[in-house]
Amino acid sequence: MALPPVYVHQGAALTAWGDAPTSVRHLLAGEVALKLQPVFGSEGGDHVPLAVRGGTIDATLPARWWDDLMAFAQPYAGSDWGTARRPIILTSSNYSVDQLYGYTRARSDATAAKDWQDVLPHRIAGRLQSALGWGPRVSILSHACVTAQVGISQAMQWLRHDLADAVLVFSFDYLSAFVAGGFHSLKILNAHLPQPYVEREEGSIGLGDGVAALVLKREPSPWKLTGASLYNEMHHFTANREDGVGFQRVLEPLLPLIAPEAVWVKGHGTGTRQAGQLEVSALNQLLPHAPLVGWKGSLGHTLGSCGAVELVLAIAAIEAGRIPGTVGSHGQTIGPQVKLDPFAADAYRQALILSNAFGGAHAAHLLEYAA
Amino acid sequence: MLLSCYIKHLATRALAPEAEAAQLADLRSEVGRRPARRMSALGMLLHRVLEGVDAGAYGRVVYTTTYTESGFIERFLESFPQPSPMMFQSSIHPGGAEQVLIQRQQGIRDFLPLAGQEQLIASALDHALLPDGEQVLWCGGEERATWLTEAGLASDRSFAFALTLAPEPADAIGTLSWDRTAFSEDTTAIDNLSWFRLLEAREPGRWNLPGGGTLSLQWHDR
């Protein structure tokens, strides 16, 4: 069944650099937001690359990110959101897990522990609904680092089937010792700054705070989402299949929609060796002429929000006329299509936005714009 | 818009709180010692209810849970300041369903892991039921933890369910209908546990959910 395209009407994002235009300016200047900081915040630990809004990852009461998130969300306040025809999809991999970490540290003191209330996704969703005057139609999605793109895909489905008039995909992931400690335990968050898509002995990632909101509708805008694809390998809890089949499977349904000479790719590109090589290899086979960039070497990996954050930044970059290169990476790249330097947006008319997550989960969206 | 589909397969399984340790041991033997080694109670329960279901054959897989991998989350939190990599990777949502599908090496396309409480079942219906003719697998559940349960931050029951939904009626055991635009003041909250109990009892009925939407369940063998 041929389904109509879906259009992005509003897009906004926050990274450690600031809003989307500010983030793109820093990316175009090749600047890295990641800074080496203690993995457990004020509790210490090894220094690892983190890009944090406000400077700390400590679990605090109220949550250190609450005011930041509220200020960002104000344009989306109002009771017409969260209704049957204007539903909201909340997407995050962590929600308020920092508050759970804080609760755990305080739990030996019953009086102190009772203050840590917003420790579950539905509780933080309830606080958002109440603070922003949203109606009840709020879905809570959580699928690790592809979460935001799963939410965008579902929003597209609802719009294409006329089950909604507009969908707000609202995404946020703020760092905490819970998450940083977890990635550090896997040894992929280490003392080295990430260099996505570069030949290195040892891979490494950085983590960053990220927030994004996208309003999607059927009515045309300059930003057309023509395709969406999801694929879950279910091969291993953290690793992708070594044959890279997941990176190919997620692209296959989109290939008929892609103009191979007119597309650029915003890859997942966290800086891990195996995933980077598999992603480059799949793109080399299927879209060998498409320039590939990754921005997590500057922004850090903003986890479940990354797909929405980087889609908004892609739009802001196209509006600015130049696409940032793979910031933070230097030297020999693992594929000729990897671009380290910025290039002109008007040489292309499609952008492919990719994410990859634990469980071998993959997500892809194709954005079309007027050259 | 009223959307209806047919229930082709239903499986439920729960652990009785008073006999959970013994029942968990039975479950471990049923699942097999080797696969059970790295599985949570929720993972093993899902393993059983998904027996015979080829998840890869479904266009959408919806997974619903309020608390998810509570046992692994507890153990990960307890492992600080030397966080355990195994507990971290196992604690990540949607680990319960992934334990089963990874063990089976069963790749799937659209996977929609949902969280929530009062709105969880309405959300699942919104995401599962689309007029696109896709077959849908909907599974979910919870597991009882220890100190997180005592604090009200994890389920006090361990249970899992799986149902498959299809657009055609052949061999159906029930019908599920969802009108997302219906609204009534007289509502019934259905959370993940209530939903499990409705399925387990094969209870027919019609429920107006808080926030809008009317759910109908009919069982063909009743």
Image (cartoon, coloured by chain):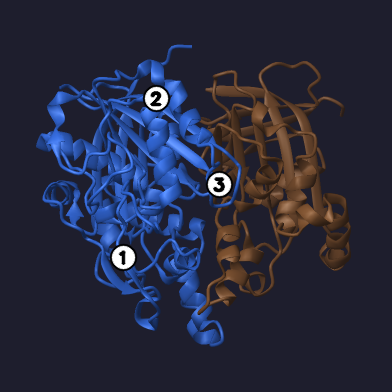
Chain colours: A blue, B brown
Instruction: Report the mark closest to the observer, 1 or 2.
Output: 2
Q: Position of residue A28 (x, y in %)?
A: 13, 46
Query: Distance between the Cα atoms at labels 1 and 2?
Result: 33 Å
Query: Distance between the Cα atoms at labels 3 and 1?
Result: 23 Å
Kindly identify which residue carries mark 1.
A50
Say what amino acid the circle numbered 1 marks. Leu
Indicate left or right for A337 with B154 as reference: left
- Measuring 14% from the left and 52% from the top, which residue is drawn there? A26
Chain letter of disc 3? A
Q: N-terminal of the two: label 1 or label 2?
A: 1
Kindly identify which residue carries mark 2.
A286
Chain letter of disc 2? A
Q: Position of residue A92 (x, y in %)?
A: 43, 51
Q: Secondary structure at mark 3?
A: loop
- Measuring 40% from the left and 64% from the top, which residue is drawn there? A189
Residue closest to the eye, A126 or B51: B51
Q: N-terminal of the two: label 2 or label 3?
A: 2
Image height of A162 relative to B22, above or below:
above
